[in-house]
Amino acid sequence: MNFFIIILVVVLGYLFISSFKDKISEANLNTLKKLFVFHLIFGTYFCFFVLGDSVGYWKMAKYMSHSDFIKSFTEEQGTYFIYALNYYPSNILNLSYFTGTMLYSLIGFMGLTYFYVIAVNLIPNNPEYKGYSLFPMLFYLPNLHFWSCAVGKDSLLIFCIAIFVYGLMLPFKRIPMIVLGLLLAYLIRPHITLFMLLGFGMAYFSGRNISVVRRALFIGIMISISFAILPSVMKFAKIEEASVESFDKFSEGKSALLSRSHTSSAIDITNYPLPLKVFSFLFRPFFFDINGIPALIASFENFILLILTITVLRNKPILSFRKAPFVIQGLVYFLIIGTFAFSQSLGNIGIMIRMRNMFLPGLIIFIYWHFSYRQSIKSEI
């Protein structure tokens, strides 16, 4: 059974890539095939060399009773919902942890594929930096794959966010994708659903060439859903009331707790100024954090992102943002909201880079858009 499922994962991955043959070029299809192999390599490495929450997500499901499964699937969110999702493959089918990792790797890769197709459709020309093509290079960043191939929340959330954004490109034709993305994200991490609604609601409200009626309808729907899920977000985050004081108290307590962690990646951010907290969330581990080969690789990756981000910020980023398509603006708002929220509360570099992965595709796509847009302006002069 395990062998059959692994072969099925490979076949489904290539079939999924082929489903975009009418939307992207043959060269991009071939790149996606290479990315799929690259992604599965990271999934294999994660399975055999990384011991973390993923093992627990799979093994706990293996020992669940049927009544626990029903309760977790129908009444719980977050960790217990993941246990419920894993119940049938792990418990009933008795699939191995490696097979489970390959299944999650496929789901994570599907999310990355949607982001890739979004970039192909929205970026008008190949962005370059000092003569180097950025596309598709940034889609090979190791941590983009490392945190979207494991059993658990992160692989699923990449998929949720991607299908939600892809659905919004043609919202009336892709309503099921939008609903599925929001619903799954809500069951996994409800606050991420809230961030998505806020980010893309703000983008739609400020978007160009959108009628007042459509803006009012869209904003009304987003606000209604946001208020409907807010109590669940508060309960999930263990915040008693929606006030500035309670959010501050939660952030301080969370950062202090994580900073006292006995892991080697714990840092004390409680006295950091806001810019340093944002830098830590987006660009650490950096070279002064290196404690092994994974941190070294991540440092080079973050150095590339930092250089590109600084270049964007120094070259009229507001203008690029205003000229960007609606979904790219939404990804930027989503990135800003998530960065501000998590940079205040996380005091562990390992958790930071894991949480950042949900927002990394948005940062990459905006970098692509900015360089492409600036190149278009120069060619017109």
Image (tube, rainbow, N blue to C red):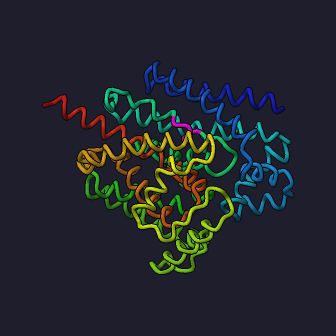
Residue 38 horizontal/vertical position (percent) = 60, 29
Q: How many discs mark residues in the rendered view? A: 0
Stretch in magenta: 141-145
Residue 195 visible here: yes
In this view of the protein, can residue 179 be seen by the observer? no
> Could you tell me which residue is drawn at 38 percent across and 55 percent down?
333
Q: In front here: 41 or 192? A: 41
Answer left or right for 74 relative to 1. left
Name the residue rendered at 67%, 25% in the picture.
Answer: 11
- Magenta region includes residue 130: no
Question: In front here: 215 or 243?
Answer: 243
Who's the residue at 72% across and 28% down the image? 8
Q: Quadrant of the N terminus?
A: top right
- Residue 325's image quarter? top left
Q: Where is residue 96 shown, x and y percent of the image?
A: 82, 39
Q: Position of residue 166 (x, y in %)?
A: 46, 42
- Residue lying furthest left in this view? 381
Between 349 and 380, the one nearer to me in the picture:
349
Instruction: Note whether 191 is above or below 164 in the view shown.
Output: below
Task: Check the image and report above or below for 93 versus 283.
Answer: above
For image coordinates 44% across by 25% down, the residue present is 24
In the image, farthest residue toward the top: 26
Q: Position of residue 150 (x, y in %)?
A: 67, 44
Q: Is residue 230 above or below residue 156?
A: below
Q: Quadrant of residue 131?
A: top left
> For the stretch drawn in magenta, what is the main secondary structure?
helix
Q: Nearer the viewer, residue 34 or 19?
A: 34
Residue projecting furthest to the front: 288
Task: Classify residue 319 as left or right of residue 308.
Answer: left
